[in-house]
Each structure stands twice: as structure tokens, then as C-alpha cells.
Image (tube, rainbow, N blue to C red):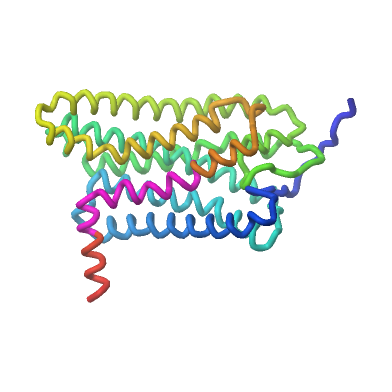
Amino acid sequence: MQRKAEYNATEFSILGLSETPELQLPIFVTVLLLYILIILGNFAIIVVIWGNPHLHCPMYILLLNLSLVDIAYTSNILPKLLNIFLTKRKMISFVACMVQLYFFIALASIEVTLLAAMAYDRFIAICQPLRYTSLMSLKHCTGLAISAWIIGLMDPTAHVSLVSKLSFCASHHIDHFFCDLAPLLKISCSDTSKVEMMNYIVGSLLTLSTFFLTLISYVLIIFTILKIKSVEGRYKAFSTCSSHLTCISIFYVTIMCLYMRPASSYYPEQDKFFSLLYIVLVPLLNPIIYSLKNNDFKDGLQKIRHKLTL
């Protein structure tokens, strides 16, 4: 069998979500509306928390950071996808592709670390309320947030460095709607075992460690809640962490379906669907389930509206 030609790619073609002409406009409108909602919802969280001193506590500081990540996360991918729909130009330079891959992995890593920090915050608040002010002071919370950003920004360095050294086959079409790791490895002619090994080691260490930290926190939270004698007390305690539990369930189900597997098992249509859930649904739901059911946030939003109308 003749070996496919190898070359150093200078640009790739992103095939997008669908090649069907009739679906282009509906998909474009849907993605645009979802992106606008994500930006507005998460920006509202940032403004309300920043503008209300009584919300400057660990839970809301972590939520503010999560909203920053969600805005950056979707802005790394969706504007390019929308541009493809508008201009029909699907090309992306090699450098731009590597940058998109870097920030995709980095922001996802920051998010899992922040979610674990938020689970720890809820554990301290419910299981050790008398020690909350000492264990989750603003200093400790700021340290957790900064650590999440540092870990996340360092995490993809090895991945991107190894991917950038790969050679690619004559086909430069990425069968996805952004530069993700699996479709890039799919079109490479080089030995990708080092990249896959790095993905398993680094990805598993971060993802599984934060997952188990989150899981242990919630197991202990549930045991503590079950010990509360009054139904009203149990409901009130559980309602403080149910929103976070919903978000992390969606987040970890999609991320594990996508990345805790060999690159050879990449299936474009299935992966595009899970990627949309991962990239769009979680950032869209975060403002809704964290804020609209939260009385403190509602009060803060009313104060911001009152200031704007004066």
C-alpha cells in the first residue's frame, strides 16, 4: 500500500456542523442566538457580583471566575464557526488552529478546577459551617481561583507542543467545527502515540483528580444533609448545592464521553453533538441555574437595575 504524502500544514479546512445547504441558515441563527445568550447571561453575573460588595464572598468569587471562563471558552470557538457560516471560508491557519486548541484545553482545565473548588466550598459550608470563615476566607478563595488559572494555562503546553510537530496527510480537512485534538490526530501521518499518552496522563490526572474531589465532597454533603432531622432543613441545605451538582453532572458526562477514550474511536457526528453540549449547553445553563434561583443574586440584580435607572 502506498503511503500517503506527509507535509507541514500551513492551514486546515474546518468542515463545520453540516454540509447540507438548507441547514446553514437555521444553524447559523441558532448558534448566534445561543452565543448572545451565553455572553449576556455570564456578563450579567460578572457585573452583578462585581457591583455588589455583599456578594464578595468565596462562592460568588468562584462563580465570577467561572463566568469569565465560560465567556472566553465559547468566544474561542463560536465566532470562528459563525464566520464560516457567513463567509463560507472554512480555512484556518496552522498557528490559529494551535492557538484555538491551546485555549480550548486550557479553559476546560480551568473550568474543572473551578468546579472542584466550588464543590469544596459547598462541602465546608454544609459539613463544617463553624469553620467556614477560616477555611474559605477571601484569601483562600483567591488562592484557589489563581491556582485554577495557573494550572489551566500550563496544562495544554505539552499537548500543543507535540501536536505542532506532527506531519499531516494530503487531506487537511478537519471533520469538526473547531480544532479539537481527536480530529487533528485523525488526519496526521505521524506516530501520535506520544500525544495520546500525554493526553491520557495529563488529562486523566487533572480530570479524574478534580472529579474525585468533587465526588467525595458531594458524598459527604449528602450524608450530612441526610442527618438533618427537619424536612425543611434538608431541603434548604440541598438547594444550596443542587445547581452546582446539575452543572457538574452535565459537564463531566460530556467530557468523559469525548476525551476519556482512544483517538482512533473518533466518530464525527457523535463527537460534534457532545462537543456542542460541552461548549454551548454548560455555559448557557450556568447563569440560569446558579443565578435565577438565587435570592442574593436576584437582590443584587435589582440593585444594579435601580442604579441604571437613576
User: Is 52 on the left or on the right of 79, as rendered?
Assistant: left
Quarter location, residue 192: top right
Which one is in front, 3 or 106? 3
The magenta region covers: 278-300
**Rendered residue at 30%/34% (across/down):** 119
Is 225 one of the magenta-colored residues? no
Quarter location, residue 40: bottom left
Q: The N terminus lies in which quarter of the figure?
A: top right
**Rendered residue at 52%/30% (across/down):** 257
Q: Main secondary structure of the magenta part?
A: helix
Give percent across and percent down for residue 260.
53, 27
Q: The C terminus lies in which quarter of the figure?
A: bottom left
User: Is 251 on the left or on the right of 230, as rendered?
Assistant: right
Which one is in front, 172 or 237? 237
**Rendered residue at 55%/53% (across/down):** 78
User: In the orientation shown, which residue stands out farthest toward the left?
Assistant: 230
Give percent across and percent down for residue 179.
63, 44
